[in-house]
Image (cartoon, rainbow, N blue to C red):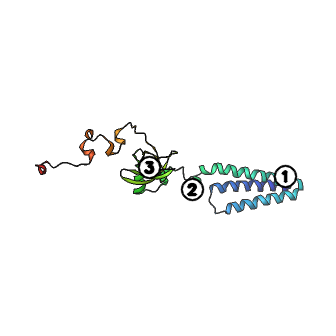
Amino acid sequence: MDPIYWSILLICIGFVVVFLELFLPSAGTLGVTAGILLVSGIVVAFFHSLQAGAMVLLVTVMALPLLLALMVKVWPHTPIGRRIILGQMSADEVMPISETNTEIRSLVGQLGTAKTKMLPSGIIIVNDKKYDALSDGFAIEAGQPIKVSAVKGNHIIVQPFDGETDDADDLPVRDRDVLSQPIEELGLGELDIENLE
C-alpha cells in the first residue's frame, strides 16, 4: 500500500481520536494518542514525497484549529459538558443565604434618610437602622429623604426621594397617617381593657 494512503488513514484516525476526547474523559490519554497519530501521518506522507508531506502538513495544521473550534462549540451540549459547565446562575443562586443578605434584599423599595452626604457612597437610615449605601448617580445631601432602588451583590443602591409615593405603605411608620392605620399595623398589641379600669 502506498505511504500516502497510510498517511491519510493515520490523519483521519487522529482526527477521530481528537473528536473522541470530547466525549470520553481519558485524562489526556486520547489527546496524546491523537497527537502521535497526526504526527505519524505527517511523517509517513513525507516518505511518499516532499510535496505530499508538505500538503498533508498544511492540511493538518489548518484543519486541527477548525476541529478544535467545532469542539468548543459542541462540547457544552455533550453529557460531560453539561455536567462540568454549570448553567447560567442568577445572582440569588450565587449569593450566600444569610440573615444579613435577606435583610438587605428586603430593603428594596423602602424609604429612609441619608445620614451623611453621599458622593456616591455614604450612610443611610432605613427603619431606624444604619446601612452603608451607594447613590444611584446623584449627589444626596445629609438629611435628604432616599428610596432604596436596588441591591446589587451586597451594595445597597439608593436614589433621592421627592416625597411622592403611590402607596402609603411605602412610607416609614412615623410619616404615615396614623389615624387611618389598623391597630395591628401600629404594633401596639391588644389593649387590656380590664387593666385600664
Quarter of the image with the N terminus is bottom right
First reached walking from the N terminus: tag 1 or tag 3:
1
Q: Is residue 2 left or right of residue 65?
A: right
The circle on residue 84 is 2
Q: Position of residue 148 (x, y in %)?
A: 44, 46
The vertical placement of 40 against 172, above or below, is below
From the image, tell me which residue sits under label 3.
Answer: 142
Residue type at mark 3: give it.
Ala
Q: Residues within 10 Å of mark 3 (few under 14, many from 20)?
A: some
First reached walking from the N terminus: tag 1 or tag 2:
1
From the image, tell me which residue sits under label 1.
Answer: 55
Residue type at mark 2: give it.
Ile
Q: Residues within 10 Å of mark 2 (few under 14, many from 20)?
A: few
Q: Position of residue 22 (x, y in %)?
A: 65, 55
Residue type at mark 1: give it.
Met
First reached walking from the N terminus: tag 2 or tag 3:
2
- Residue appearing at x 82%, y 55% in the figure: 57
Helix, strand, or loop for circle 3?
A: loop
- Residue appearing at x 80%, y 58% in the figure: 41
Q: Is residue 173 left or right of residue 104?
A: left
Distance of label 1 from label 3 (alpha carbons):
75 Å
What count of labels does the image hold?
3
Of the two numbered discs 1 and 3 in the rendering, the one whose residue sits closer to the viewer: 3
Distance of label 2 from label 3 (alpha carbons):
50 Å
Q: Is residue 8 visible?
A: yes
The circle on residue 28 is none
Tag 1–tag 2 contact (CB < 8 Å): no
